[in-house]
Image: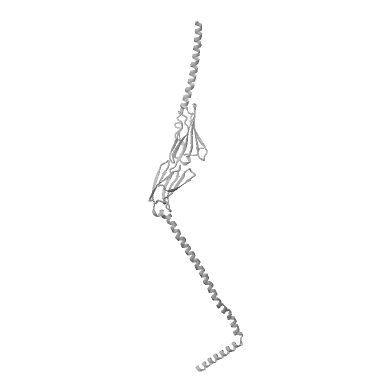
């Protein structure tokens, strides 16, 4: 019996030892997994920054002593990808295809691995990602950067009496509202740098107003402008139609008068021509009369007698004087 109990005790003891060994191995692997899961592995985030300001991008919070290599990958719109890397064991940095001098390390990479842009421009819209290599694994953090541009807001009254509210070169596009509401038309114009100009034109024909306001909503801030409407400009559009009718009537009257004058002048010219025809016939007969006078003997005799009488009268007068 003693030998039997001793053998069973040994078996039980061996089983207990094997169980403890397996439990310790599983426990150590679980602890390693838990430690790895506790390390930050953050995903992408969106970041909006006003233009002409400073933007800073941070890497995941990792102890620098466990760091091997850190790489920043920069992907901008319509440009080639840019990389900036830091290797800790050699304490050296490298760059690849990075030409924008405004994008730099925030400080010394051996102290701070953050990236900065100073100042931010509309061309810096893009994706920025920090990749870190450690013995415990690789970690990253990405940023979708959107550069904000406040629009230039103006409010004026046009010649036809409408009010025009304009939010020029904003990013993203602004929203325009009116008080009071009217008959409005809104248009957008997109520019190559990503900005948008929004223009809203309103009229209040049914209810003439003396004052209106325009409100512009934008992520960089809201703005409101007021405008006093002049009655003369408001009624210009309505009076224009009244001015057109008399002008058209005057044009027709002048045109009709010119036409009548031309017709009456033509008739007078025709009458004058018909009256002038007898004179022409008399002129045409004159050569014939002169011809008959020259070739008729009766005309020659009469002329000779007249000449003789005149000559005798002259001679008589001359003798008396002597």
Measured from the top left, where is residue 129 in percent x and y? Answer: 49, 34
Taking depth in this image into account, of 88 and 117 the one nearest to the observer is 117
Which residue is found at the position 52% from the left and 71% from the top?
267
Residue at the spot x=50%, y=9% of the render?
8
Compare residues 318 and 205 and report the one nearer the observer: 205
Q: Is residue 243 above or below residue 86?
A: below
In-front residue for pair 306/313:
306
What color scheme is it?
Answer: one colour
What residue is rendered at 44% in x and 57% in y?
Answer: 241
Number of residue marks: 0
* Location of residue 169 by image quarter: top left
State whether residue 166 is above or below residue 306: above
* Location of residue 170 in the rendering, given as x and y in whole percent from the top left corner: 45, 44
Q: Position of residue 137 (x, y in %)?
A: 50, 27
Return the residue found at the far front.
206
Give residue 80's position: percent from left, percent from top: 52, 38
In this view, 308 is above or below 260: below
Residue situated in front as seen by the camera: 257 or 139:
257
């Amino acid at each position: 019996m003693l030998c039997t109990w001793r053998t069973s005790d040994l078996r039980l003891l061996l089983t207990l030892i094997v169980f403890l060994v397996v439990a310790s191995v599983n426990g150590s692997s679980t602890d390693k997994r838990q430690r790895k899961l506790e390390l930050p592995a953050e995903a992408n985030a969106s970041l909006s920054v006003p233009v002409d300001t400073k933007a800073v991008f941070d890497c995941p919070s990792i102890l620098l002593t466990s760091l091997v290599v850190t790489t920043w990958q920069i992907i901008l719109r319509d440009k080639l990808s840019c990389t900036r890397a830091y290797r800790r064991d050699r304490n050296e940095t490298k760059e690849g295809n990075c030409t924008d001098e405004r994008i730099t390390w925030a400080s010394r990479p051996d102290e701070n691995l953050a990236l900065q842009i100073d100042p931010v421009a509309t061309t810096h819209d893009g994706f920025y990602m920090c990749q870190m290599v450690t013995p415990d694994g690789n970690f990253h953090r990405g940023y979708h950067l959107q550069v904000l541009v406040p629009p230039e807001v103006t409010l004026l009254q046009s010649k036809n009496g409408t009010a025009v509210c304009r939010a020029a070169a904003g990013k993203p596009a602004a929203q325009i509202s009116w008080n009071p509401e009217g008959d409005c038309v809104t248009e957008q114009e997109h520019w190559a740098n990503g900005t948008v100009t929004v223009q809203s034109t309103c009229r209040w024909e049914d209810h003439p107003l003396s004052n209106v306001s325009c409100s512009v909503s934008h992520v960089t801030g809201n703005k409101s402008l007021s405008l006093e409407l002049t009655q003369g400009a408001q009624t210009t559009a309505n009076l224009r139609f009244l001015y057109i009718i008399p002008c058209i009537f005057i044009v027709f009257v002048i045109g009709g008068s010119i036409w009548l004058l031309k017709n009456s002048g033509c008739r007078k010219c025709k009458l004058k021509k018909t009256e002038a025809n007898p004179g022409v016939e008399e002129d045409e007969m004159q050569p014939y009369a002169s011809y008959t006078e020259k070739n008729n003997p009766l005309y020659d005799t009469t002329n000779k007698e007249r000449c003789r009488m005149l000559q005798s009268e002259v001679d008589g007068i001359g003798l008396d004087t002597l």
